[in-house]
Image: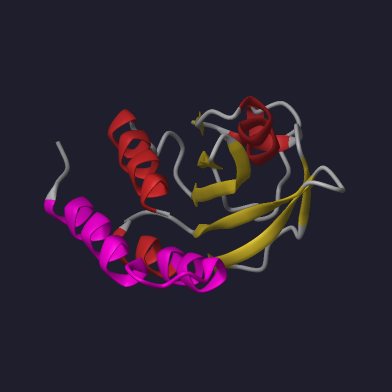
């Protein structure tokens, strides 16, 4: 189901996180690997849940500087966090409540990270192309999140 680059990405993520308990270190390396192995993207990274404030807070990423805080329920990231389901936005500018951190982004995939039934954060990947992310990408990044 996965092509060679996708298998390499999953294998690399598994290898680099094996035995490393530090979440921030792992997310930093994972965002670098996503950036390395995924074509036609301009941002890849993580937002982590701040439960007290009901916000997603910027975590490790690759790309231009990004929005630091996103309210749960707002924009693509906030909607994925609230619904606890992957969202693929083919055209982010038509997504209700879209937060434009990078005006060059045209499409986005956001995968919630859930551990022991609790939301930890989201994986967010942007592309400068409309409709960049396919169902195969959704499956790939959902699988990647399970490795985390």
Of the pair 24 and 78, the residue shown nearer to us: 24
Identify which residue, 62 or 16, lies in the foreground.
16
Magenta-highlighted residues: 4-31
Q: Is 28 included in the stretch rendered in magenta?
A: yes
Percent coordinates x, y for residue 144 in the rendering: 36, 49
Please name the residue shown 39% across and 64% down the image: 35
Residue at 69% in and 60% down = 58
Q: Is residue 57 left or right of residue 38?
A: right
Q: Name above or below for residue 78 compared with residue 148.
A: above
Q: How many marks?
A: 0
Depth check: give the residue in front, 40 or 10.
10
Whether residue 145 is in magenta: the answer is no
Residue at 47% from the left image edge and 69% from the top image edge: 21
The x and y percentages for residue 126 are 51, 49
Task: Specify whether 78 is left or right of 13.
Answer: right
Name the residue rendered at 66%, 68% in the picture. Answer: 65
Q: In which image quadrant can residue 80 be found?
A: top right
- Residue 147 as seen in the image, left or right of residue 53: left
Of the 4 image quadrants, the one containing the N terminus is top left
| Rendering quarter of residue 13 | bottom left
Considering the whole magenta stretch, tell me its main secondary structure.
helix
Above or below, comparing residue 116 to residue 14 in the picture: above
């Amino acid at each position: 189901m996965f092509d060679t680059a996708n298998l390499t990405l999953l294998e690399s993520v598994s290898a680099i996180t094996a035995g490393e308990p530090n979440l921030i270190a792992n997310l930093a390396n994972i965002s670098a690997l996503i950036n390395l192995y995924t074509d036609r993207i301009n941002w890849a990274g993580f937002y982590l849940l701040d439960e007290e404030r009901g916000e997603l807070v910027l975590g490790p990423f690759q790309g231009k500087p990004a929005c630091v805080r996103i309210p749960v329920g707002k924009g693509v990231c906030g909607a994925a966090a609230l619904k606890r389901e992957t969202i693929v936005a083919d055209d982010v500018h038509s997504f209700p409540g879209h937060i434009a951190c990078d005006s060059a982004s045209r499409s986005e995939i956001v995968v919630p990270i859930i551990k022991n039934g609790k939301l930890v954060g989201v994986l967010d990947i942007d592309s400068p192309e409309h409709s960049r992310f396919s169902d195969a990408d959704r499956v790939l990044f959902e699988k990647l999140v399970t490795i985390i």
